[in-house]
Image (cartoon, grey):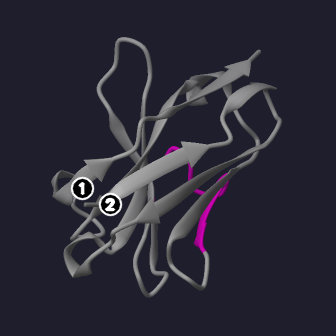
Amino acid sequence: QVQLVESGGGLVQAGGSLRLSCTASGLTSSTKNLGWFRQALGKEREFVAAISWSTQTLYANAVKGRFTITRTSTRDTVYLQMSSLKPEDTAVYYCAAGSILQTATSYKYWGQGTQVTVSS
């Protein structure tokens, strides 16, 4: 059973930085890609970034150049370094594990989410 535990959310001023962490257990060959998604109040959940087992990365256009996703050498922890944060980045951020890096619907396992709030 895949389990994902996020941490690192909080309140930050616009222009600031935060780092989210996600520790995974029980990963298999069909859940080897780890990604971050977010859901703002009243909006649908959207893709943010993802990283494959081989550390290939993918980013949403809205965060490209500001966010960086990395993965430890043990492959069980993924980080999302968020810089130049904007109020529109405010959302609950979820870590997820999936089989296809670029396919959001392949992410079947989810963490509990961590709140990120960016004040203007």
70 inside magenta stretch: yes
Within the image, what quadrant is residue 50 found in? Answer: bottom left
Give the mark count: 2
Q: Could you tell me how far apart the alpha carbons at marks 2 and 1 are, in whole angstroms?
A: 5 Å
As displayed, is residue 54 above or below residue 58?
below
Determine whether the residue tagged by mark 2 lies in a helix, strand or loop.
Answer: strand
Residue lying furthest top: 42
> x and y percent of residue 22 in the render?
54, 55
Q: Can you identify the residue that label 1 sits on?
A: 107
As displayed, is residue 42 above or below residue 21?
above
> x and y percent of residue 105 in the render?
16, 52
Q: Can you identify the residue that label 2 sits on?
A: 97
Closer to the camera in the image, 120 or 2? 2
Closer to the camera in the image, 86 or 35? 35
> x and y percent of residue 115 in the render?
57, 27
* Residue type, label 1: Tyr
Residue lying furthest left: 105
Range shown magenta = 59-71
Circle nearer the N terminus (2, 1): 2
Q: Is residue 57 left or right of residue 19?
A: left
Closer to the camera in the image, 6 or 101? 6
* Residue type, label 2: Ala
Can see residue 60?
A: no
Q: Are marks 2 and 1 in contact (CB under 8 Å)?
A: yes
Residue at (82% x, 34% y) in the render: 15
